[in-house]
Image (cartoon, grey):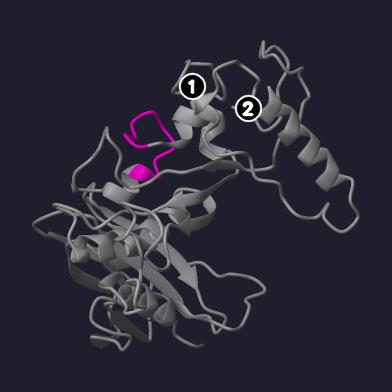
Amino acid sequence: MAVAKLQRDLYKAVKSDPLLAKYPVWSISESGAQRDNAGLQFLDIPPGAQTLMPAGTKYADYANVHNYIYHPHSPYPADNKTWDAADPTAASRVDRLFGNFGVTWARRFRGYTQEQLDTLPRVTTETGNRIDGPVTEEIHGLNLMNVYLAQFKRGYAHTSVYLLRDRTDEAGNQSFGFYRADYSPRKAAVYLHNLTTILADKGTLAKPGQLDFAIANQPKTVHELLLQHSDGTFQLIVWGERLSGQDRVTVQLGVTPASVGIYDPTTGVEPVKTLTSAGSLELTLSDHPVVLAISPRRE
């Protein structure tokens, strides 16, 4: 109850301040740990919730979770690790949205329905993974690149990864970082730097366009995300999350573009191949994204 009252008062204070009111308030993390039903599994307690705090109590604008990629219920590398960590349903095995805001994991207090969770505004203030045992530096790097894509695709407005640089003051947390304690980069830092360099755009686009595309018989371990640059170039990110093996897919475009540049952030920031007048592309995917920079034809 003390936490609930603090969060209620914080929300009121922020929203009554002329400078702060425009900023969203994020919920506490681990609302699923409630021992008494104070209603922290809601952003705004609805009528009939039967919580200790009254209906109409407002706590936050966004649900906040710490959905680390690995969890005691899902401790080992597997297909779709980051995709599953971002899953808003009960199917996710990690410390997920459902277990904190659907049915709380500690005492099973009921919160939002699955239909409501699907569109619930949400952020992650901690996720990541540690290099340890079967999680090699390579798997760590691929996980920390893929997690941003999976999170954004599955509705998370912000994602914070633990940790930029390894800690030296806390036992057991010396291998989470993009960088080692001596500031030397791990593969995670190189891969993410390459991806953000490929996607970087200093301009803005007043009205995004549309790109018709399809991936026939899309495997469960293949995911896609469509973005667009301010110059009109589409960036179709297609990534695989296979622990081993490959998926071969065909990306069919609704129109024949002027050119398609294919980028692989695990190898660098320059295109590995450029195609012209290609209405379809054959891709072999495994455990990381490729970026298709699709330049439309100019009339």
Q: Which residue in the structure is indicated by mark 2?
A: 40
Foreground pick, 177 / 252? 177
The reply to whether residue 143 is visible in this rendering is yes
Q: Amino acid at mark 2?
A: Leu
Magenta-highlighted residues = 85-94
Determine which quarter of the picture holds residue 249.
bottom left
- For marks 1 and 2, give the CA distance: 11 Å
Identify the residue at image location x=75%, y=54%: 23
Q: Amino acid at mark 1?
A: Val
Report the side of 26 relative to 71 (left or right): right
* Element class at badge 1: loop
At x 83% / y 52%, what residue is drawn? 21
**What's the residue at 43%, 76% (across, down)?**
196
From the image, tell me which residue sits under label 1: 103
The residue closer to the viewer here, 7 or 145, is 7
Identified at 34% across, 55% down, the residue is 173
Image-based side of 115 in relation to 23, left or right: left
Q: Position of residue 207 (x, y in %)?
A: 64, 71
Residue 143 image position (x, y, % from top left): 29, 58
Residue 269 image point, x, y percent: 33, 85
Helix, strand or loop: magenta stretch? loop
As drawn, 14 above or below 163: above
Residue 176 x/y as whole percent: 33, 59
The image quadrant where one finds the N terminus is top right
Under circle 2, the secondary element is: loop
